[in-house]
Image (tube, rainbow, N blue to C red):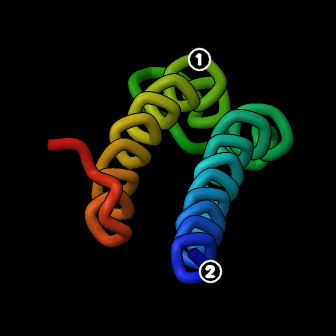
Amino acid sequence: MADDKNMAQAYWQANLRLIAGCLVVWALASYGFGILLRPILAGISVGGTDLGFWFAQQGSILTFIALIFFYAWKMNQLDNKFGVHEE
């Protein structure tokens, strides 16, 4: 019983670390590059516009979609590691 509880706690901690990492990447792409660092990125041109504007309009969305797939992939690995995967 105690071993199951320890495994469940370790699984949850690994899940929370993954979520925190994804949120940091999302915040950096959305707020960092799109808003806070936009004046610094203004000199770099991507697709006819500056990089800060691109991150605000397209980059944050593409980063979010990539994070969804990354999270699903990593959670499948965690599920397999802790034996809670679906058949």
Residue that lies at the very extreme toward the left in this rendered image: 87
Which residue corresponds to the image point at 26% horizontal and 63% vertical from the top-left? 80
x, y (%) of residue 5?
Answer: 62, 71
Name the residue type under label 1.
Gln
Q: Which mark, by number, is residue 86? A: none
Q: How many marks?
A: 2
Which residue corresponds to the image point at 81% horizontal and 33% vertical from the top-left? 35
Left or right, 84 with reference to 40: left
x, y (%) of residue 27?
Answer: 73, 43
Which residue corresponds to the image point at 37% horizontal and 69% vertical from the top-left? 82
Residue that lies at the very extreme toward the front in this rendered image: 1
Q: Which residue is mark 2?
A: 2
x, y (%) of residue 13?
Answer: 65, 68
Residue that lies at the very extreme toward the right in this rendered image: 36
Which residue corresponds to the image point at 68% horizontal and 47% vertical from the top-left? 23
> Counting other residues with Cα less than 10 Å from the Cα at mark 1, is it few (<14), some (14-19), or many (20 or more)?
few
Q: Is residue 82 above or below residue 70?
A: below
Q: Which residue is mark 1?
A: 57
Left or right, 19 with reference to 87: right
In front: 21, or 83? 83
Q: Return the disc, 2 or 1, that comes first in the chain's sequence.
A: 2
Name the residue type under label 2.
Ala
Q: Is residue 47 above or below residue 34?
A: above
> Counting other residues with Cα less than 10 Å from the Cα at mark 2, is it few (<14), some (14-19), or many (20 or more)?
few
As measured in the structure, the alpha-carbon distance from the residue carrying label 2 to the one carrying label 1 is 49 Å
Left or right, 21 with reference to 7: right
In front: 77, or 60? 77
Tell me the quadrant of the picture where the N terminus can be found: bottom right
Q: Are marks 2 and 1 in contact (CB under 8 Å)?
A: no
Secondary element at image label 2: helix
Secondary element at image label 1: helix
Tell me the quadrant of the picture where the C terminus can be found: top left
